[in-house]
Structure formats: C-alpha cells, structure tokens
Amino acid sequence: MSAIPLSTVETTQEEPPVNLWRDAWHRLKRNKLALFGLVVVLILAFAAIFGPYLTPYDYLSQDLQARNAAPSLQHLFGTDDLGRDVFSRVVFGTRTAFLVAIVVTLIAVTIGLVLGAIAGFFGNPFDSAIMWLTDVTMSVPNLLLVVVINASLKTPIAKWMEAQYMATLNPFYRQTIWVDFFLVFGSMALISWPPYARLVRAQVLSIRSRPYITAAQALGLSNWIIMKRYVVPNALGPLIVSVSAGLGTAMVLESAFSFLGVGVNPPTPSWGNMISDGLRVWQHYPHLLAAPAAVLGLASVAFSFLGDGLNDALNPRGSK
C-alpha cells in the first residue's frame, strides 16, 4: 500500500472545521451593499446611544434669534421655527426610531415565534386557531387599528396618570411621552407579529419531519424539550433575516404614524413628526423636510441591503 504524501496530510489537518456563522460572515463581507448597510446601521446605532451626549445643542433648547436658519457650520442642518437645532433633533430622533423599532420587533418576534412554533409543531386544532387569528389580524388595515387603539386608550391613560400625579406628586406621571411609547409599542406589535408567525410555522413544519426529531421522540423527550432544543434553534436562521428587515419596516411605520399624529408627539423628536412639520414650510425652508426625510430614507435602505445580504449569507443555496 502506497504511503499518503505528507503535504496532503498537513493540508487536510490545517483546514478549519465548517462553521455556519463564520462562513456566513465571509459571504456577507463579499457583499458590498450588505457591508454598506451594516456600516450605516452601526453608525445610526452609535448615534442613538451616544449622539444626544455629543451634539452641540440640546434638542429642546430654543434660540428665537436664529429661527429657520439655513444649514451652516454652526447649525449643520439649520434650525426650525423655534430656533431649535435640527441636527440635534434628528440625532435624538434616531434614538426614538431605534427604541421603537427594537422594542416593537422584540415583542412581535416573541409573539410570532411562540405562536408559529405551536401552530407548526402541534398541528390542529392549534394550527387552525392561530392561523385564523393571523389572517384576521392581517386583514385589518394597519392605520385603522393604530388610530382606534390610540383614540380609545390615550385619553383614559392620560387621565389615570394625571390622577396618580395629583395623589403622589411624582413628576414621572407628568411625562406623557411614556403614554405615546406605550401605545406605539402595543399597537405596532399587534400589527407586526403575523408575518413572523407565518414564517416560523413554515420552518417548523419542515423541521418536525426531520430524522433527528423522530429520534428525539423515540427517546421519550417531551414535545416542549424537543421544541426548545431542536425545533426553535433550527428555525432561527430565516427569522434573523426577517428581523433585520423588520427593524427598518418598524422605523418607517413609526415615522408614518408620527407623521399622521398617532405616534410619538412633540416635543419629543421623531423623524415622522419632524417630516410633518417640515412639509408645511418646505417651499420656504426645505432643510426642515430634507434632513429627517434623508436620514429616514438612508436607514430604510441600509436595513434593506443588510437584510438581503443576511439572506444570501445564511441561505447560500437560495442566492443567485
């Protein structure tokens, strides 16, 4: 029997083991648009966390002598009709957008993951009931549902907070921004979870027929342990891709609802209410509309590029 060349043995031993996440990262790095999206998302995340501490002005500070000033070195994006620095407000609006997007997406993903896994793994009657609920939720117009929730709950909650303030004199109950956030989180999560539930259900239906699931059932493992250890982890890949795109969608939705007056209301900066204010005077002061609209468009495109890149990286067989 002939001996195996030493060089062949050394080459075989030096080859690193296959790793899904490392291979996905290598594929992601070769996608220039995905890298662009990742860089923009990281910059926006940095601005959301640290930006308000680095901006030259407070987002609420007013300078009536510098009202509606054009962009300059002193005010990079100009000032609004109250003399507030638009750049500082756009940066603080990044925090609002990320906070809403992350919290809403986490709530929606959690609901969708739980309901989708139950529907796909246990089948009827859970499957029929959950899919019926999904179809009903998706059939209701998003804007109508958000308007109804805000109109029905905002006034009672505001009155309750005012009563609590009168009883305790705690200034926290005078911060109505938390009412806006609570209603935005709840209403947006209610309209955002069905796509995640459908995606997880489809993945679980495919996974539950795999041999390792049959083997786990033959060993006597309970259904909940099988779901936690084998089904849900193997369904996370497509869900991660969907979440990356869902973050951008949540930002756009929050801006749209704030633009229509049913989201985050002034004086808290939001890209949506800034666009709404700028739209009224854009012919005379176009910078008031251009600055928040450009940042919102950039964020939406960046999350779209990143989502497409993650899809190609995590599902190489489905990429072109």
Image: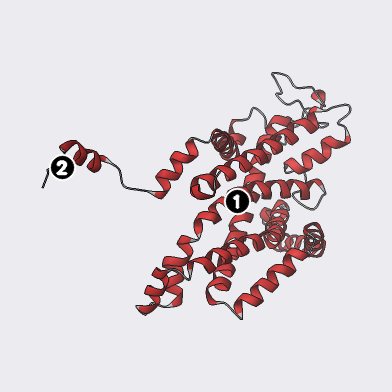
**For residue 312, which numbered disc appears in the image?**
none
Answer left or right for 169 relative to 276: left
What is the secondary structure assignment of the residue under circle 2? loop
Q: Identity of the amino acid at label 2? A: Ile
Rendered residue at 70%/24% (across/down): 76
Label 1, label 2: how far apart the Cα atoms are: 55 Å
Q: Can you identify the residue that label 2 sits on?
A: 4
Label 1 crowd bin: few (<14), some (14–19), many (20+), radius 10 Å: some
**Nearest to N terminus: mark 1 or mark 2:** 2
Q: Can you identify the residue that label 1 sits on?
A: 102
Image coordinates for residue 298, horizontal then vertical, percent: 67, 35
Nearest the eye: 100 or 92: 100
Rendered residue at 68%/53% (across/down): 171
Q: Identity of the amino acid at label 1? A: Ile
User: Nearer the viewer's eye, disc 1 or disc 2?
Assistant: 2
Nearest the eye: 149 or 312: 312
Label 2 crowd bin: few (<14), some (14–19), many (20+), radius 10 Å: few
What kind of colouring is applied to the model shown? secondary structure
Rendered residue at 77%/60% (across/down): 158
Nearest the eye: 287 or 13: 13
Task: Please identify the quadrant where the C terminus is shown.
Answer: top right
Image coordinates for residue 275, horizontal then vertical, percent: 79, 38
Image coordinates for residue 299, horizontal then vertical, percent: 65, 39
What is the secondary structure assignment of the residue under circle 1? helix
